[in-house]
Amino acid sequence: MLYEWIKALHVISIIAWMAGLLYLPRLFVYHCQAPAGSEASETFKVMERRLLRAIMNPAMIAAYVFGITMIVLTPEWMKQGWLHAKLLFVLLLTASHMMMARWRRDFAEDRNTRPQRFYRIANEVPTLLMIGIVIFVIVKPF
């Protein structure tokens, strides 16, 4: 019974984390259109900071805590290839999160030099990683 609760909390955490990972680059696309120092730019700064600090960071930490707990409760998973592949993709998702945090700081300091197109492409990375993770966990191809 405890395992099922932990798994449910893990999935809830992932949903919240993914929502942020998919929304933050979209905010960056719109933020590129706002002149530095404008009211719109300042509003985007607040939205981006709150999304990262209040939703994405706690959700990522919770996903890790519940995920690690599930591995501790089912150590036999560590012998299965699908879990290693999933964990690699989770690390890449975390790297994506960290890059977004850096880009947010650039916007906060009015130092963004990247065009909208960059953020539109970056917006696809979490989606592709999520697809891989879901396939590894559900299909367990190896």
Image (spheres, grey):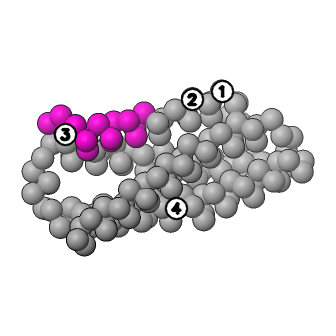
Q: Residue 117 carries which label?
A: 1
For marks 3 and 2 on the same chain, the one whose residue lies earlier in the sequence? 2
Give the Cα distance between marks 4 and 1: 25 Å
Give the structural element (helix, strand or loop) at label 4: helix
Give the structural element (helix, strand or loop) at label 2: helix
With 114 as the anchor, is 64 left or right in this view?
A: left
Looking at the image, which residue is at 43% across and 54% down?
A: 14
Give the Cα distance between marks 2 and 4: 22 Å
How far across and how far down the image is residue 70, in percent?
Answer: 24, 63
- Using a 10 Å C-alpha cutoff, classify the residue at mark 1 as few (fewer than 14 neighbours), some (14 to 19) or many (20 or more): few
Give the magenta range. 128-142
Q: Residue 140 carries which label?
A: 3
Q: Residue 57 carries which label?
A: 4
Give the structural element (helix, strand or loop) at label 1: helix
Dot 2 and dot 1 residues touching (CB under 8 Å): yes
Give the Cα distance between marks 3 and 2: 28 Å
Looking at the image, which residue is at 9% across and 57% down?
A: 76
Identity, as a three-letter code, of the amino acid under mark 3: Lys
Q: Residue 121 carries which label?
A: 2
For marks 2 and 4 on the same chain, the one whose residue lies earlier in the sequence? 4
Identity, as a three-letter code, of the amino acid under mark 2: Ile
Which is nearer the eye, 89 or 136?
136
Give the structural element (helix, strand or loop) at label 3: loop
Give the quarter of the figure containing the C terminus: top left
Q: Main secondary structure of the magenta part?
A: helix
Give the Cα distance between marks 1 and 3: 34 Å
Identity, as a three-letter code, of the amino acid under mark 4: Asn
Identity, as a three-letter code, of the amino acid under mark 1: Arg
- Using a 10 Å C-alpha cutoff, classify the residue at mark 3 as few (fewer than 14 neighbours), some (14 to 19) or many (20 or more): some
- Is 67 located above or below residue 44 in the figure? below
Foreground: disc 3 or disc 2: 3
* Quarter holding residue 33: top right
